Structure formats: C-alpha cells, structure tokens
Image (cartoon, grey):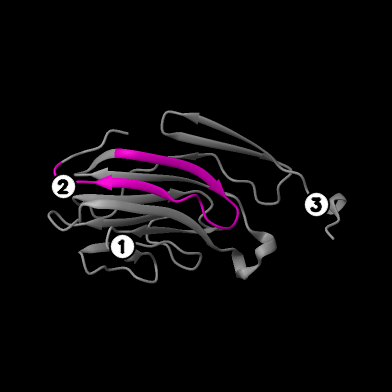
Amino acid sequence: MTNYSNLQVAIALFIFFSSAVLLISCDSKYPAEPFEAKELRGQSGELRFQLQYSNSDLADLELHVQGPDGEILFFGNTESGTGGTMDLLCGLNFCQHAGIENIYWQKGRALNGTYRYWVSYYEAPNGNAAQKAPSSYILFVLVDDEVVAKQTGTLQGGNSETFRFEYEQGVQSPI
C-alpha cells in the first residue's frame, strides 16, 4: 500500500496564451520549465507532424504517427513504405534540435485518410522511473507548411491521448 504522507504534492497551473504553454509546478524535484513554441525545424512536406517539448535534458518524449495504411512512424521505424520520414529525433543521449521531433511526407506521397498521432514518455535519466521529469509539449500538424492543427499537454510518464487528423490531398482542414 502506498504511504501518501511520503509523496510530494505538486500543483500545476496551465496557462495557454497564443502559442505559448506555461507550466508552473510547486514542490517538484524536476519542475517543467516555462515553454513556448520554437521555430519549426526539419524537413517540410505535403503533410507534416512536429513535436516540440520542454526539459529535453531530463525527459525523452517520442512522436508517433500512424498513417491510414496502419504503419507507425517513430524512433524505431523512421521511414514508411508510403514515403513518410522521421528526419529529426531527440533522446536523452542525443538530440539534433533540443526537444524537437519531425515526421513528414514529400509532395504527392501522403495517403488520403485518417492519421493518428500521439506522444509517449520514453525514458527518464538513467532509466529511473522515479525521476521522471514533467515535460510540456506542443504537437503541430502542417499541410503544405501551414499549421492546420495544434495540441498541447504535459507528460510525466505514459502516453498522451491519441489525436486524429483527416487528410485529403489538396484540402486543408482549419484548426
């Protein structure tokens, strides 16, 4: 049985202003830092999913995108048979651009249909689950370099909810 008197109690206040997400955490060993959207990096394309997250030195968040054909792109499968490519990866031991992961489809290669995408909390420092730092994230969906959807949240383990995006070539869905 858990002894709740030994657990620290954290209070998080989320303030959403424009494209910024601010997380204030009280009495936490690893507080999430204030977080604002960074410049979009990585390869652009007809269809693109980008994850940006805070605390990349203490947390390893992973972007997953499942195409209409069922294939999942993530750090363990960086190229799909339909032309999807993960060109930016970020992990605790390596990071091309601090806290940014990017998956895109080249012009004319993205399939029409439902794309599912989510974030998973992959790893804490030295694999120590007790030291998982909270990490705020922003997920962008872009069609022809225009943001058409945005999701925000915070993880300290597990997975985010699974988001859906309906894609039809030549048609942009509004945010």
Q: Which residues are magenta?
A: 148-170
Q: Residues within 10 Å of mark 3 (few under 14, many from 20)?
A: few
At numbered mark 2, what does the secondary structure look like: helix, strand or loop?
A: loop
On screen, residue 65 versus residue 16, left or right, reads left
Q: Give the residue displayed 32% in from the left and 34% down from the top.
A: 175
Up the image or down, 25 lies above or below 78; here it is above
The answer to whether residue 1 shows anywhere in this view is yes
> Which residue does the numbered mark 3 point to in the structure image?
7
Q: Residue 158 lies in what quarter of the image?
A: bottom right
State the image coordinates of residue 28 (x, y, percent, origin top left).
71, 47
SS under mark 1: strand
Dot 3 amino acid type? Leu
Q: CA distance from mark 1 to mark 3?
A: 38 Å
Return the residue at label 2: 169
**Residue 87 picture location, percent across and down:** 29, 62
Neighbours of disc 1 within 10 Å: few (<14), some (14-19), many (20+): many
Which residue is painted at 25% across and 37% down in the image?
Answer: 173
